[in-house]
Amino acid sequence: MTGGVFPGQADPPSDIGVVGELLERVLGDATVAAALERVLLFVLAFLVVYLLGRLVVLPVLGRAFDRRDLDRHARRPLIKIAKFGIVFVALAAAFGAADFGNFLVSLAGIAAAGALAIGLAMQNVIRNFVAGVFIYTDRPFQLGDWIEWEDHEGVVEDISLRVTRVRTFDNELLTVPNSALTETVLKNPVDAEKLRLKFVFGIGYDDDIEQATDIIVEEANAHPEILEDPEPSVRLTELGDSDVGLQSRFWIGNPSRGEFVRIKGEYVTAVKERFDEEGIDIPYPVRTLEGGVALEDRVAPPSISE
């Protein structure tokens, strides 16, 4: 035996490695040894890259999610995508290490053709998927937020990579495609667990604006559930046909629909009662009709007796 080749055998493949030579000595067949060497390299490369991804990439992603304060529900789809990416990279590395280049090229071509066909057939799904990724990264809203878009509003109950589920204030569950929330103007009235409310009080032109402003602010400060910081404010915003509009802006700490309706109702009622006590008028809209009524002579209809 010379050079690691058994007598009477063909020369081993030129690309055989150390492991292949050892296997050749055991099995006595260079071709089988080379094939087994590639399989072992494939498995070894896959395991190394996959474990590195699980032990290094996933913890790094976890720390990044912690810095962005992503909730547990929002992390799940992103972690799934990361795990899929780790498996894909591990397979690619394994094919390369095992020198299955031709197979990998063929597989990539088939995958590209399949991806094109699937992409054309699932344009809406892909658009909603991409929109879901942007929702997770940009965070225009989170679970529990009250959002408004177009003619809809409600509280976010679930966010997935394709749809977002919103519970309306009539207790209806809306399943909204993510693209519908990223391609339109979205309003999130809640900021840092606080909600700003506005209400316009109309007073007469002969009433004292400063007195009415003081009453509006005093009643806001007197309500136990209206926040002092930020402090309530009043601005003259409208000069209507029959009244002067004073817009009150105030904040509450509980942004839920039921609570904000109750607090707003109590506050407006208190201001109205103070206006009545102080003689400040809340005028009704006035409409002036101009013109005249013309009376024309009409021939009386004949009587039945005729």
Image: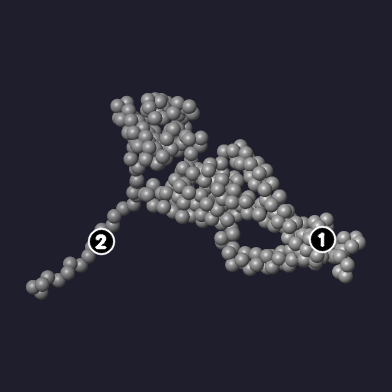
Q: Residue at x 46, y 42 (%)?
A: 144
What residue type is disc 2 on?
Glu
User: Where does residue 255 sit, x and y in percent of width and height?
Assistant: 43, 38
User: Where does residue 168 sit, x and y in percent of width and height?
Assistant: 41, 49
Q: Is residue 304 left or right of residue 286?
A: left
Q: Residue at x 34, y 43 (%)?
A: 286
Compared to residue 268, the image places residue 159 above or below, namely below
Helix, strand or loop for disc 2:
loop
User: Where does residue 42 sit, x and y in percent of width and height?
Assistant: 73, 58
Q: Disc 1 marks which residue?
A: 25
User: Where does residue 209 sit, x and y in percent of width and height?
Assistant: 41, 28
223 and 171: which one is in front?
171
Q: Quadrant of the N terminus?
A: bottom right
Helix, strand or loop for disc 1:
helix
Q: Quadrant of residue 299?
A: bottom left
What residue type is disc 1 on?
Arg
Compared to residue 112, the image places residue 164 above or below, namely above
Q: Is residue 117 left or right of residue 206?
A: right
Compared to residue 242, the image places residue 3 above or below, namely below
220 and 279: which one is in front?
220
102 and 231: which one is in front?
102
Q: Is residue 46 left or right of residue 19?
A: left
How packed mark 2 is, by other alpha carbons closer than 10 Å (few <14, some 14-19, many 20 or more), is few
Dot placed on the residue nearer the N-terminal end, 2 or 1: 1
168 and 47: which one is in front?
47
Q: Residue at x 44, y 28 (%)?
A: 227
Q: Quadrant of the C terminus?
A: bottom left
In space, the residues marked 2 and 1 are separated at their CA atoms by 125 Å
Q: Disc 2 marks which residue?
A: 296
